[in-house]
């Protein structure tokens, strides 16, 4: 019903410029490609992901809680002796 000719003209200019630069407007950006770009940007995350993929041991938050509980149990046993 309402047509904004400025938006249409701007969209046409944008498509023309993208065509001149060789940027395809048909293919949307893939979410995985963007996430992979940011994950590879940091060395820590990249190494952690590579270690996990290789089957290496990566201690997490659960392991920390388990070790604290074990330490608390040993402390209680030693105090009771």
Image (tube, rainbow, N blue to C red):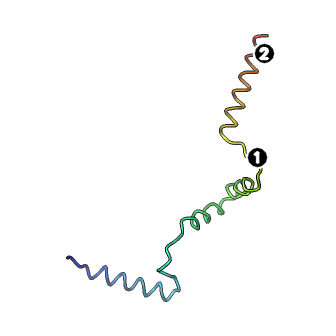
Q: Residue at x 43, y 88 (%)?
A: 16
User: Residue 41's quadrant in the figure?
Assistant: bottom right
* Residue 81 versus residue 39 in the image, above or below: above
Residue 12 at x, y percent in the picture: 37, 85
Which quadrant is the N terminus positioned in?
bottom left
| Neighbour tally class for label 1: few under 14, some 14-19, many 20 plus, Cα within 10 Å | few
Taking the spot 57% from the left edge, 66% from the top edge, the residue there is 34
> Which of the numbered marks, if any, corresponds to residue 78?
2
Q: Which of 56 and 47 is in front in this view?
A: 56
* Residue 34, above or below 2: above
- Which image quadrant is residue 47 in? bottom right
Q: Where is residue 60 in the image (x, y as percent from the top left)?
A: 68, 42
Q: Which residue is drawn at 70% across and 37% down?
A: 63
Measured Cα–Cα span from mark 2 to mark 1: 30 Å
Question: Is disc 2 surrounded by few (<14), some (14 to 19) or many (20+) residues within 10 Å?
Answer: few
Identify the residue at horizontal 72%, vertical 31% (top origin): 67
Tell me: 34 left or right of 8.
right
Which residue corresponds to mark 1? 57
């Amino acid at each position: 019903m309402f047509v904004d000719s400025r938006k249409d003209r701007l969209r046409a200019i944008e498509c023309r410029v993208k065509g001149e630069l060789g940027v395809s407007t048909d293919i949307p950006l893939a979410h995985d490609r963007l996430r992979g770009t940011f994950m590879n940007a940091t060395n820590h995350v990249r190494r952690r992901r590579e270690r996990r993929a290789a089957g290496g041991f990566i201690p997490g938050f659960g392991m920390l809680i388990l070790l604290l509980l074990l330490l608390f149990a040993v402390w209680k046993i030693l105090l009771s002796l």
